[in-house]
Image (cartoon, rainbow, N blue to C red):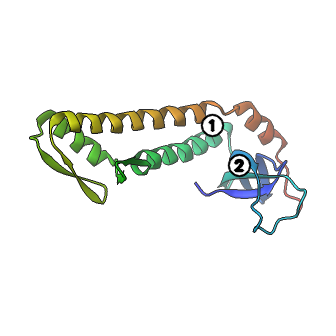
Amino acid sequence: MEKRIAKKGIALVQKIGYNKYVVRFAVCNYQPSEDEHRPAGKEYVQFASVEFTHKPLLSEIREAIEAAHNADIADAIVNSLTVDGIQVALTLENQANFAAMLQVGVFPATVKIGGAYKEFADKAAFEAFYRECRTHIEHTLAAGRAVKEAYDWSEYEKALAEAEPSQS
């Protein structure tokens, strides 16, 4: 999800035009680096956003935010595991292939994991690799669930009720 930066205190839901609303989420404090050209002494936040061409319902806001987080979780599962210095592409296809190999694999075996090949001398070595993959997936899913469960949807309900046209 693309992140943006704004001054602290920006509304979670804001009307930005005729029947156009922006909803901000994944809001966190942001400290500009020294080479950024931002006024000193100001506080900033970083956030992701989604736009609607109508005043959204709370259920639409929740669905959009959860979809964005689900996409980030899926990307993290596929692209953020490194084993022995090799990035493992945990696509659904590779996950199925690894599970099948665990069941019927003949060892020693050479397996392509990401952009490189890795040699597994025996089934025990492959089982250790497979456990590491499964642990990565389970931890990534748990972290994603925690992020989604931390949302206080009443804050969005309140912001939705207070949504005003932009003052530009």
Q: Nearer the viewer, residue 64 or 3?
A: 3
**Which quadrant of the rendered structure holds the C terminus?**
bottom right
* Residue 19 in sight in this render: no
Numbered label attached to residue 59: 1
Relative to 9, is 99 above or below?
above
> Is disc 1 surrounded by few (<14), some (14 to 19) or many (20+) residues within 10 Å?
few
**In the rendering, which numbered label is found on residue 24?**
2
Measuring 90% from the left and 56% from the top, which residue is drawn there? 41
The answer to whether residue 79 is above or below residue 60 is below
Residue visible at 65% across and 31% down? 150
Q: Where's residue 155, x and y in %?
A: 76, 35
Q: Give the Cα distance between marks 2 and 1.
A: 15 Å
In this picture, residue 106 sits left or right of residue 127: left
Q: In this view of the protein, which residue sits in the foreground, 80 or 64?
A: 80
Please state which of the two labelled residues, at mark 2 or mark 1, is closer to the viewer.
2
The disc, 2 or 1, on the residue closer to the chain's N-terminal end is: 2
Q: Is residue 85 left or right of residue 48?
A: left
Q: Secondary structure at mark 1?
A: helix
From the viewer's perspective, tell me whether residue 48 is left or right of residue 133: right
Decide if residue 25 is in sight here. yes
Q: How many marks?
A: 2
Question: What residue is rendered at 73% in x and 53% in y?
Answer: 21
Q: Amino acid at mark 1?
A: Ser
Name the amino acid type tagged 2.
Arg
Q: Position of residue 140 (x, y in %)?
A: 47, 38
Disc 2 on helix, strand or loop?
strand
Q: Which quadrant would the N terminus be assigned to in this image?
A: bottom right
Which residue is painted at 76% across and 54% down in the image? 31
Residue 167, position in %: x, y?
89, 60
